[in-house]
Image (cartoon, rainbow, N blue to C red):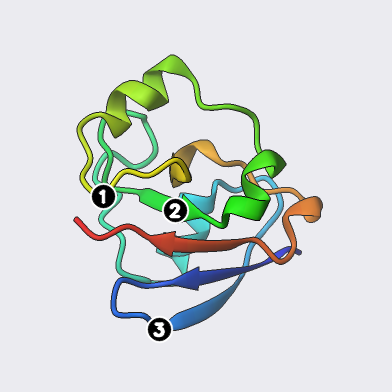
Amino acid sequence: MPKVIVQTPDGAEHTVDAEVGLSLMEAIVDKDLPMEAICGGCLSCATCHVHVDPAQMAWFEAKTEDEEDMLDLATNVTDCSRLSCQLKLEERHDGLRVVIAEE
């Protein structure tokens, strides 16, 4: 079970024990951390926007065009921005660090 370190917009860090196969968004929401995730992972909003640690961006496949389009609607987008609903967790993601983006 990978442990993910999630920093909330207020700067607090939380360790999330995530089930393999869940999306990062599901793991964050299951821990009751402050993430809207309005569409529930359907890739039709950007309310699960996170910033992935730059050193860990290569742990995931590249963004799809659909994800890029949704990120165009978000604020505070950086090169490390991802939609957490698009990041499926695997054992190899143990130690992943993300920051929930401020809206």
Q: Is residue 84 above or below residue 86?
A: below
Residue shown at the point (38%, 44%) measured from the top left: 78
Q: At 37% across and 71% down in the image, what residue appears?
A: 33
Q: For the residues labelled 2 and 1, say whether their Cβ atoms are less than 8 Å apart.
A: yes
Q: Position of residue 45 (x, y in %)?
A: 25, 35
Which sits in the foreground, 62 or 54?
Answer: 54
The answer for how far apart the CA atoms under marks 1 and 3 are is 18 Å
Quarter in which the N terminus is drawn: bottom right
Residue on which the image places disc 2: 51
Residue carrying label 3: 12
Number of numbered discs visible in the structure rendering = 3
- C-alpha span from label 2 to label 3: 15 Å
| 33 on left or right of 28 | left
- State the residue lying farthest toward the right: 92
Q: In the drawing, does residue 21 fall left or right of residue 86?
A: right
**Residue beneath the point at 37% across and 72% down:** 8
Secondary structure under tag 2 reads strand
Residue 31: x %, y % from top left: 46, 71
Q: CA distance from mark 2 to mark 1?
A: 9 Å
Residue 6's mark? none
Amino acid tagged 1: Asn
Label 3 is placed on what type of residue?
Answer: Ala
* Residue in the image at 57% along x and 57% along y: 53
Question: Farthest residue in the top direction?
Answer: 65
Residue wearing tag 1: 76
Mark 1 Cα-neighbour bin, 10 Å: few <14, some 14–19, many ≥20 = few
> Based on the displayed image, in which of its 4 quarters is residue 67 positioned?
top left
